[in-house]
Image (cartoon, rainbow, N blue to C red):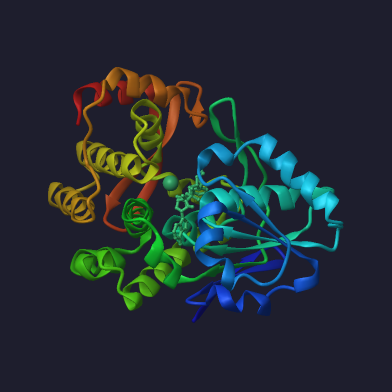
Amino acid sequence: MENISVNLNNRQSHIYVGECLQNLNKYIERRNTFIITDKNLDSLYRARFPECPVYIIEPGEKSKNLNVVADICRWLLENGADRKSFITGIGGGVVCDLAGFVASIYMRGIKFGFVATSLLAQVDAGIGGKNGVNLDGYKNIIGTFTQPEFVICDVDLLISLPDNEYVNGMAEVIKHSLIKDYDQFVHLEKSSIQILAKERNEMEFLVNRSARIKSEIVEMDELEQGERRKLNLGHTLGHAVEKVTGMPHGESVSVGLAFAAKLSVEKGLLKEQERTRILNLLQAYDLPVEINADPGAVFDALIMDKKKEAGSVHFILMKGIGDVIVEQIDIDELKNFTLNGN
Ligand code: NAD
Ligand code: ZN
């Protein structure tokens, strides 16, 4: 088992990669813990949960709303949760975002931890302290930055994760390697068969490495004033693609990564052969690198995105594999490129 500690100001958060759900009771006090999970995890793994009160949400993005937050808060009140209580979210990114948000506002904030069960939650959503819910079609528009006490990444749980969800998480794993880990990129190139076959050693290795990258970036810039923006690689266009096509997040990010690579070549930052390697890697993991959507609609969605800043957007470009920079790009320049490129 690997213990990654995330040091922020004067507190620490711990990520345990390779730890298992059955050992959760080592990290909590059973008598004051409240568990939040979703229906799928409850039916698959309830026997491994510690004996604590459990709130079960419907699986999926539709549960990330203020009504569900209010329902959970009511349930906590009815069950006597107080300021000393502890919340544990057992699930994917949806459960983590909801459980973290509820914990950060219930009685002005109580402590919490996660057992991250999807690949995306283990390498991304569970780490970094962002939480929140959606409102009126705006994603994650209400939320806080509050760090969990611990994140348990039980890679054995990934066996039951549906293949499409696993591949979604792989888009973020590839993104992390492109941001700052060339060696991991090479490893992903060499080991796609074993990784797609969910070999345990491979999963533990890649979750460990990917979770470390996210943690390091969060340590440098918890509140996303600079360095953390790099994690948006592929996401500026990816979010727009997701909105217009309804494609899953990971697939949309994959298209966004391919787009960022193309723009980086266009700007003389990335070599054409590096772009080819990136496209090949995404495709090796069954991720798309282009879409059949109206570029105008994608562009409109892009400028609606919350990251727009008067006439320009922060865009993450690649200077090489494992090396990125944040650039302020003019909306018009992006518009011309979106409509002509890809
Ligand atoms: P999810 O939580 O909806 O999980 C995907 C599906 O897989 C669900 O049906 C879930 O029940 C199922 N599942 C999860 N683990 C399983 C397992 N071990 N076995 C079988 N089924 C399992 O989605 P996700 O992809 O994990 O997370 C997406 C969410 O994460 C989005 O809401 C996104 O906004 C959020 N997110 C947050 C951050 C952050 O920093 N807070 C970062 C990235 C994404
Ligand atoms: Zn993402």
| On screen, residue 322 above or below 262 | below
Q: Could you tell me residue 314's position as x and y percent?
A: 44, 35
Residue visible at 50% across and 44% down in the picture:
60
Residue visible at 30% across and 67% down in the picture:
184
Q: Could you tell me residue 240's position as x and y percent?
A: 39, 30
> Can residue 5 be seen from the camera position used here?
no
Place residue 119 in its image quadrant. bottom left
Considering depth in this image, is 272 or 152 the residue closer to the camera? Answer: 152
| On screen, residue 195 above or below 145 | below
Q: Going by the image, does 84 lie left or right of 270?
A: right
Q: Could you tell me residue 201's position as x and y percent?
A: 34, 78
> Can residue 58 be seen from the camera position used here?
yes
Residue visible at 37% across and 74% down in the picture:
205
Considering depth in this image, is 42 or 117 the residue closer to the camera? Answer: 42
Place residue 296 in its image quadrant. top left
Place residue 252 in its image quadrant. top left
| On screen, residue 50 above or below 70 | below
Considering depth in this image, is 39 or 298 the residue closer to the camera? Answer: 39
**Which image quadrant: the C terminus?**
top left
Q: Going by the image, does 244 lie left or right of 14?
A: left
Residue visible at 32% across and 26% down in the picture:
334
| On screen, residue 25 above or below 164 | below
Q: Could you tell me residue 120's position as x and y percent?
A: 44, 55
Q: Going by the image, does 296 lie left or right of 98?
A: left
Count how many numbered circles sit on residues in the image. 0
